[in-house]
Amino acid sequence: MSALTLFHSARFTVSVADLAAMAPPALPEIAFAGRSNAGKSTVINVLTQQKRLAFSSKTPGRTQLLNFFALTEKNELGERVERGYLVDLPGYGYARAEAGQRATWDTLVGGYVGHRQSLIGIVLVMDARRPLLPADEALLQFVDRRGCLLHLLLNKADQLGTVERRAALAGAQRRAERIGPRASAQLFSGLKREGVEELAATLTRWLFA
Ligand code: GDP
C-alpha cells in the first residue's frame, strides 16, 4: 500500500474547544501547527487529497478549535478501522490578535501540545521564505519541553530559486539537528504538490514505528 493511501482516508470527526472535552487518549495523533497563512490548510488538503478538508477548520466558529480527522484502513473483513488522527491546530501569529484570543490559544494549544499523551508528533508548517519566526520558535519551546517528534515543513518552496531552496532547507535542518534525532525538515509546495510522498513517508514512520 502506498504511504499516501492512509492519508487519503482522512475524515473530519470532531472539533474541540477545551481540553477537558477531548476523548481520552487512544490512537496516535499527529498535529499540524503553523502561522496563519503559512499554508497549513493547503498542506493538509494536499496530503489527504481532499480539496476542502482542512478548510472546514476555517469556517466561522472553528478557527480557534482543535479539529480532528480520523485515518482509517480496511481490515481483513473489509471493515474500516481507525489507525490514528490528524489534528489541525489553530493558526497563530495574527498581528491583530487580541490579548484575550492569544491567552485562549496558549491555554488550548499549549495544553494540548504540552500534555496530550496520544500526541506523537507535530508538523510545523512554515513559509519557506520566512521560516522560524519568533512565533514558530515559541511553539518549538512547547515541543522541546514535551520531547515529541517534529517535522519542519518549508511550504511554498515554489516561490524560491534553486540557491534559496538549498539555503532554506539547510537552515531548517540545522534547527532540527539542534533539537535532536526526533526532528527533521523538508521542502514542500502545496501549490505544485511537491514533497507529498516525503511527508507521507515521514508520518507513516511516526505512526507505525
Ligand atoms: P493557512 O492559513 O496556514 O491554513 O494557509 P492557507 O492554506 O489558507 O494558504 C494561505 C495562502 O497561501 C493561500 O493564498 C494559498 O493559496 C497560498 N499557498 C498555500 N500553499 C502554497 C504553496 O505551496 N505555494 C504558494 N505559492 N502558495 C501557497
Image: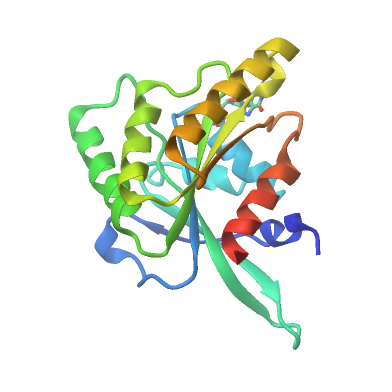
Percent of width and height locating residue 114: 30, 51
- Where 16 sits versus 26, above or below? above
Occupied quadrant, residue 118: bottom left
Residue 207 drawn above or below residue 132 = below
Quadrant position of the C terminus in the picture:
bottom right
- Screen quadrant of the N terminus: bottom right
Residue 197 occupies which quadrant of the picture?
top right
Quarter of the figure with residue 161:
top right
With respect to residue 72, does 200 lie above or below?
above
Q: Residue at x 62, y 77 (%)?
A: 81
Q: Is residue 96 left or right of residue 73?
A: left
Q: Can you give x and y, in whole percent of width and height, for residue 167 in the image?
A: 62, 16
Q: Is residue 151 above or below residue 118?
A: above
In the image, what residue occupies the spot 71% across and 43% down?
Answer: 198
Image coordinates for residue 87, horizontal then vertical, percent? 48, 53
Judge whether residue 86 can be spotted in this image: yes
Asked if residue 51 shows in the view, the reply is: no
Q: Going by the image, does 125 lie left or right of 208? A: left
Q: Is residue 196 left or right of residue 142?
A: right
Viewer-closest of 63 and 117: 117
Front one among 12 and 182 = 182
